[in-house]
Image (tube, rainbow, N blue to C red):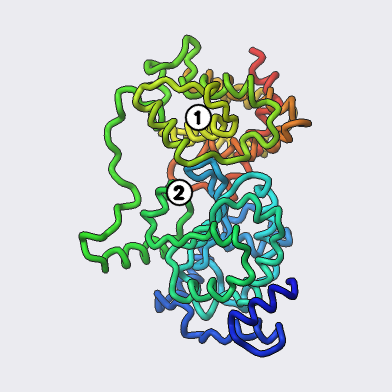
Amino acid sequence: MSSDLLVDLHDELGGDDSPSAALDQLKLVPEKQWPQDDPVSVSKSATDIKSLSDGSHMAWDDPFYDIARHQIVEVAGDDNFGRKVIVFNACRMPPQHQLNHHMLLMYLKQTLDKYVESDYTLIYFHHGMTSENKLSLSWLRDAYREFERKYKKNIKAFYIVHPTMFIRTVLIFFKPLISFKFGRKVHYVNYLSELEEIVKCDQLVIPSRVREYDDKIRMNLKPSVVPGSISPAHSPPLPFQQFGVPLSVLRDRGADSDGIPLVMRDTITFLQEKGLQTEGIFRRSANVSLVKNIQQKYNSGEKVNFFEMDDVHLAAVILKTFLRELPEPLLTYKLYNDVVNFHSVDSASQAVTVRNMLMSLPEENYVSVRFLVQFLAQVSAESEVNKMTNTNLAVVFGPNLLWAQDAAMTLSSIGPINNFTRVLLDLHQDVFSQ
């Protein structure tokens, strides 16, 4: 930490002459100010952790296994603007003496390392942070210092869900340490319903305790100011609607003679001509209002011309958004278990196995998967320029090709899905040779 920042912090707190004393004052926030929303939070935390202990995506001898098994840190696919979502759950943290906080910081850093080259969103669920499991202020200071520019550059938003007066106070204390640009990315979210503007809550692994707490605080509001429910009733699809509509319906709604949906055909045609050599294609987000505007145009039957807009990242985000908003994933729920268990398939049999899996898809799904994969192979062929290898493309597209029907996306499922997607890209010529 630079000396000028320490001096600024010292001045902000109006403390002693030594910079270290200023930091020490951060620890003077009374313990009782840590939120105690749930009087049985500690026992519930232990129950949650026990139920999660079998869900780690790591081998038991991995150095981060003891951290990962608590599922404090999760990855949840993309948000509504094409950015990867990293989730931190305070209520899943065990008591301090049961968790190595330094290892937690290293695990968070290792998780972010896989995604920081892409634009990403961080969501922090604060409910459940108590005096028993709280992170020290020195840990928060070290975390901010540990995450150098490459981590901060591509984080587009940091959402603090269910903030308390304490967490707001902590951020005020840390204001001298936080850059102006990073500070603008911090947002408070008071209710889960507000998250729907950012990410589909159904795809998040939101702990039951957090949902229960949200229900409790919503019930205490006057009916006239209660925010909308997390999953509002869906209105009937518009006559020309392209987003959120089954592929079987889209066959009769603008698909070409090969059965490729209009949005996929438009975006991929443009990207094949204009985007193959764009560095970081599919890693950047796009202007939020533009994304919504394009969706509205498609859904109302208006013609969309990406060549007129000439925005590679906008077209890339629209393609990912289209896939993510399908009522059923492109690879279908039927293939979910086969994909998640694909790692056990012998390498010599992988091409045949993948081919047979894809051949079981409905025709409209199969032709769309083939069209997409053949395009992604073109992107990968230019990876020396665009930096998007098959592995990188799999990280981007895996969660948009498949998700579970009855469970949110977690690190334990994302890994196998991404692995299958990479193999599909690696072996695409053999898979689609017949």
Q: Are marks 2 and 1 in contact (CB under 8 Å)?
A: no
Q: Amino acid at mark 1?
A: Leu
User: Considering the image in quadrants, where does the N terminus appear?
Assistant: bottom right
Mark 1, Cα crowd under 10 Å, few <14 / some 14-19 / many 20+, is many
Q: Amino acid at mark 2?
A: Ile
Q: Is residue 20 visible?
A: yes
Establish if 228 lies above or below 296: below
Q: In the visual, does 306 lie left or right of 418?
A: left
- Residue 235 percent location from the top left of the image: 27, 36
> Which is more toward the observer, 74 or 308?
308
> Which is more toward the observer, 8 or 382?
8
Mark 2 lies on residue: 198
Establish if 320 lies above or below 127: above
Q: Is residue 349 visible?
A: no
Q: Residue at x 57, y 53 (%)?
A: 86
- Residue 120 percent location from the top left of the image: 59, 49
Mark 2, Cα crowd under 10 Å, few <14 / some 14-19 / many 20+, is some
> Which is more toward the observer, 38 or 412?
38
Single out the residue that lies furthest toward the top: 257
Q: Foreground mark, 2 or 1?
A: 2
Q: Quadrant of residue 276?
A: top right
Which numbered disc covers residue 330?
1
> Which is more toward the observer, 205 or 147?
147
In primary-sequence order, the first of circles 2 and 1 is 2
Q: Residue at x 71, y 53 (%)?
A: 150
Q: In the visual, does 30 lie left or right of 254?
A: right
- Residue 97 percent location from the top left of the image: 62, 79
Q: Secondary structure at mark 1?
A: loop
Q: In the visual, does 102 lie left or right of 230?
A: right
Which numbered disc covers residue 188?
none
Q: Residue at x 64, y 12 (%)?
A: 434
